[in-house]
Image (cartoon, rainbow, N blue to C red):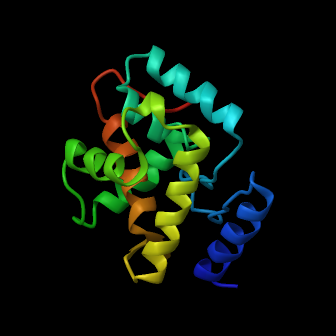
Amino acid sequence: MNRRTFLSVGVAVGASAVAGRVWWGRFEEPVARVDLDGAAASATRVARLGALGLEPETAALLGLLPDPGAAAALGARAEATGAFGDEATVRSQLVSKLLEGPASASSLEDVRERWLHHVTLDFDGGRVLAVDGWLLARTEAELYVLAAHVERRPGWSLEDR
């Protein structure tokens, strides 16, 4: 089964079960599989990232990822394609797509649903990026690139966050 079919099936099953997951497959080391987990785990990550000084919007976006460190590694590879701007540009694009108003006003479930919706639209519209043999939706790649930008900040590491 190809990645696009797998993602479409995952979105359909997840929407009907409300707490669905999207699986991205396995990447070569050191990049681990990146997937979504439950809202409670996301809320814990958002609170932890916010307490460490990360901007509320960035924390809300990276809170979607159970392993921001693995996402940052894949994001660095995606960024190497030259298809993305600086951190502020990438964050702005994601905020406009995924957050309605302040980050605190958007529930994590709403953010997750909008993210899945945009990933599906990207695949349907052909807005994909080839990275290490995988086709990533543009929105998916932007989130990983944002993680890579945060990972490169002085004194920051997303490993084990």
Which residue shows up at 28% across the image and 61% down it? 80
Q: Position of residue 146 (x, y in %)?
A: 35, 45
Q: Position of residue 44 (x, y in %)?
A: 63, 25
Quarter of the rendering occupied by the N terminus: bottom right
Is residue 135 among what the camera can see? no
Q: Position of residue 84 (x, y in %)?
A: 24, 59
Q: Position of residue 97 (x, y in %)?
A: 37, 55
Which residue shows up at 38% across the image and 17% down it? 53
The answer to whether 83 is drawn above or below residue 87 in the figure is: below
- Could you tell me how many numbered marks the image carries? 0
136 or 97, nearer to the observer: 97
Apparent side of residue 106 relative to residue 6 in the rendered image (left or right):
left
Apparent side of residue 15 relative to residue 17 in the rendered image (left or right):
left
The answer to whether 123 is drawn above or below residue 78 in the figure is: below
Which residue shows up at 60% across the image and 78% down it? 3
Residue sitting farthest toward the right: 17
Quarter of the rendering occupied by the C terminus: top right
Is residue 140 among what the camera can see? yes
Which residue shows up at 38% across the image and 35% down it? 58
94 or 65, nearer to the observer: 94
27 or 75, nearer to the observer: 75
Apparent side of residue 59 relative to residue 3 in the rendered image (left or right):
left
